[in-house]
Image (cartoon, helix red, strand yellow):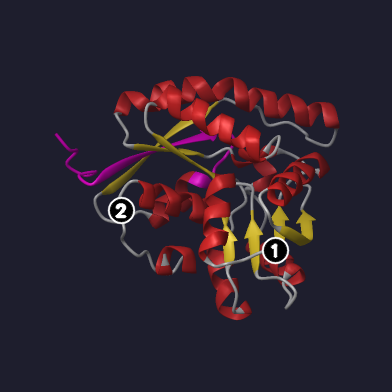
Amino acid sequence: MPDTLGFRKRIGIVVPSTNTTVQPECDMLRPRGVTNHTARSTTKERPLNTEQAFIEHMQAMRDGTGAAIDQIMTAAVDHLIMGVALETFWGGVASSKTLQAELEGRAGVGVSMGSSATVAALHKFGAKRIAVLTPHQQRGDDMVRHYMTEAGFEIVRLKGLKCPSPRAIAQVPPDEVRASLQELNGHDVDALVQVGTALPAVSAAAEAERWFGRPVLAVNAVTYWDALRRSGIDDRVYGFGRILEEH
């Protein structure tokens, strides 16, 4: 029997416990009859300004993901979003595909990830040359650059905001996101890409598309788009970016 509220689909979302952006941004995007359900992998608020701290932070997120999946699957969700985007870029394309297969095997349902969803969205627009905005420290930026290059894209420019801690990512003001996108924009790129699920950028990216005249893909928007389409939901969602409106 379908849920009374989620009578079309139930989408599960796994996020780090410090992430306060994925849940509200995904809730903005859901069509009628689709419900979102969030599970949290426990992570600590801590400085990320050293290599060791960053590696330990990534390991903590990995360690908690399996338990979070097991928890959310008790709600019998129909599809799962991996709301830890950097992990999905880590190690390149082959590692990302392995991770997706492992997550889908554990969950027993399809899994949408920031890396593969971003690639799918870029292909929809025929984009090859891109500029990228991240909230990450240098190691995270290197992982994103490596993955996107392996996936066949030329990164013309990349800006990492180097947010000092996990919670600080969600505190980046809209003006800083807009200014960063303006800095990255140019006629030498086909599209702009924002990664880092805790960075609040869906609304700013949709606004930037109207000004720049080219796709600006926010990771939470493209991952939710991927989840909807792979769940058989073809509704166009307006006001939050061309990927949801046109594809």
Observer able to see residue 19: yes
Q: From which residue to which does the magenta span run? A: 1-22
Mark 1: few, some, or many residues within 10 Å (few <14, many ≥20)? many
User: Which image quadrant for residue 50?
Assistant: top right
Q: Is residue 218 left or right of residue 183?
A: left
Q: Position of residue 95 (x, y in %)?
A: 64, 32
Observer able to see residue 241: no
Residue topped by disc 2 = 233
Question: Quick check: 140 above or below 132?
Answer: above
Q: Position of residue 101 (x, y in %)?
A: 50, 30
Q: Is residue 72 left or right of residue 115?
A: left
User: Residue at coordinates 74% horizontally, 41% vertically from top-left?
Assistant: 143
> What is the three-letter code of the residue carrying label 2?
Ile
User: Which image quadrant for residue 181?
Assistant: bottom right
Residue 58 on the magenta segment: no
> What is the three-letter code of the residue carrying label 1?
Ile
Q: Is residue 137 left or right of residue 242?
A: right
User: Residue at coordinates 64% horizontally, 35% vertically from top-left?
Assistant: 94
User: Which image quadrant for residue 147?
Assistant: top right
Q: Earlier in the sequence, mark 1 or mark 2?
A: 1
Say the numbered circle drawn on residue 130. Answer: 1
Out of 7 and 107, give the one closest to the viewer.
107
Q: CA distance from mark 1 to mark 2?
A: 28 Å
Q: Position of residue 45 (x, y in %)?
A: 68, 31
User: Residue at coordinates 79% horizontally, 47% vertically from top-left?
Assistant: 162
- Look at the image and tell me in which quarter the C terminus lies: bottom left
